[in-house]
Amino acid sequence: MIVLAADKKGKVLHMGNIHETAVVAPGAKLGKNVEIGPYSIIGENVEIGEGTRVGPHVVIKGWTRIGKNNEIFHGASIGFEPQDLKFDGEKSYLFIGDNNTIRENVTIHRGTAEGGGETRIGNDNLLMAYCHVAHDCQLGSHIIMSNATNLAGHVVIEDSAVISGMVGIHQFVRIGKMSMVGAHSKVVKDVPPYILVDGHPAGVNGINVVGLRRNGVSPEMRKEIKIAYKTLYRSKLNIDQAIEKMDQELDASEEIEHFLRFLRNASRGICR
């Protein structure tokens, strides 16, 4: 059914395809060509960008901003209050970018005051069925989270990381760009960029060579990353010594600089 959506003053905001059984609050703002499926509920403070499709039985609430051309499958719960006993009802936010696919029964929660008040998800991500993104998580772009993976609060995942199915990630852990976490892993420490980890708890299994190739990293740069990996994991140097050696001996490329910067900021320690 094609309907008109209006603001609180009755001003028409757009025309959209909203199923007759859906409930859209008067204050919600929907862009052009937004679709809302049967029995879905869109809250008062929600904004949904142009071309986004919301499937059946989806609930989106809170101060949630969703960008353009996302697809949200049935049963997803987005923008709910954090599962944090310290949360006291304060105003907090969820920001989701463009071109994301959010599959069945995914749950994504808003931020808390302690974590800066917002949860963020970038662009072009795939969150498969039953994934959970907790409060204050910060996700980049081009990330794949496989089925039933769960992120605790304050987790950071950098661009182009791949998280396999049924993974549990501890609060405040950071997952580096173009890294990969194997299925059923328990991740309690930071995963450096470009690295493959697996296990319970997760341990390092080498370089994510397939991921580097898929992301267009040149053979020359892959050789530099291999040297960095061996310096960090195969030498007898501690982390500070390995960083110093890499800083002195490797080319100052964007990839290596990011690797070193990640290691310098690894307050939880890194997977070994």
Image (cartoon, rainbow, N blue to C red):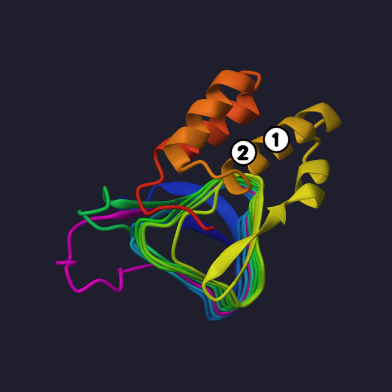
Residue 126 in percent (x, y) is at 66, 60
Residue 116 in percent (x, y) is at 26, 47
Q: Amino acid at mark 2?
A: Thr
Q: Is residue 192 visible?
A: yes
Q: Residue at x 57, y 73 (%)?
A: 167
Quadrant containing the N terminus in the rendered view: bottom right
Look at the numbered disc 1 and give the secondary structure of its residue. helix
For residue 88, side relative to residue 59 (left or right)? left
Q: Residues within 10 Å of mark 1 (few under 14, many from 20)?
A: some
Evaluate if marks 1 and 2 touch, with contact meaning CB atoms under 8 Å apart: yes
For residue 43, side relative to residue 202 (left or right)? left
Which residues make up the magenta segment? 67-96
Query: Which residue is outermost to the front?
Result: 236
Residue 132 in percent (x, y) is at 49, 71
Q: Amino acid at mark 1?
A: Ile
In the image, residue 197 lies in the stretch drawn in magenta? no
Badge 2 is on which residue? 231
Look at the numbered disc 2 and give the secondary structure of its residue. helix
Observer-nearest residue: 216 or 63?
216
Badge 1 is on which residue? 227
For residue 8, side relative to residue 143 (left or right)? left
Quadrant containing the C terminus in the rendered view: bottom right
